[in-house]
Amino acid sequence: MDYLLKSNPNQLTTKEEVLKYLLHSYYNEEYQVEFIHMYNHIDGKSLREVDNRILCELERNKDEFNLYSGNIGDKYIVEDIKKYP
């Protein structure tokens, strides 16, 4: 697993490795906010996409009626979920 998620930020060489490092450290509550801000300046799209997908899943999992209630099989809803920015 070490080859997938590097724990030493000095060993990161690509944007993908940096993103994996940030997400893993955030998940483990070991992140540094300045690294996240720095990454957003490099690639402001990836973290926004992750955030939007999480917000979409939170909306879908609400108990009350929501945007996706009863429509998950609808092809337009499926397309919307796939491209939800």
Image (tube, rainbow, N blue to C red):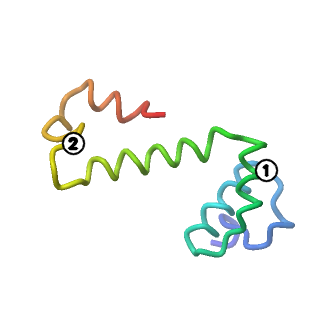
Nearer to the camera, 17 or 80: 80
Q: Earlier in the sequence, mark 2 or mark 1?
A: 1
- Residue at 71%, 63% (x, y): give it: 33
The label nearer to you, 2 versus 1, is 2
Q: Quadrant of residue 1?
A: bottom right
Residue 50: which numbered mark, if any? none
Label 2 environment density (alpha carbons within 10 Å; few <14, some 14–19, many ≥20): few
Residue 66: which numbered mark, if any? 2
Disc 2 is placed on an element classified as loop
- Residue at 69%, 63% (x, y): give it: 21
Measuring from the top left, give residue 41's x and y in whole percent.
77, 43
* Residue 11 sits above or below residue 15 on the image: below
Q: Quadrant of residue 13?
A: bottom right
Label 1 environment density (alpha carbons within 10 Å; few <14, some 14–19, many ≥20): few
- Residue at 23%, 53% (x, y): give it: 62
Disc 1 is placed on an element classified as loop
Measuring from the top left, give residue 49's x and y in whole percent.
54, 41
Q: In the image, what residue type sits under mark 2?
A: Asn
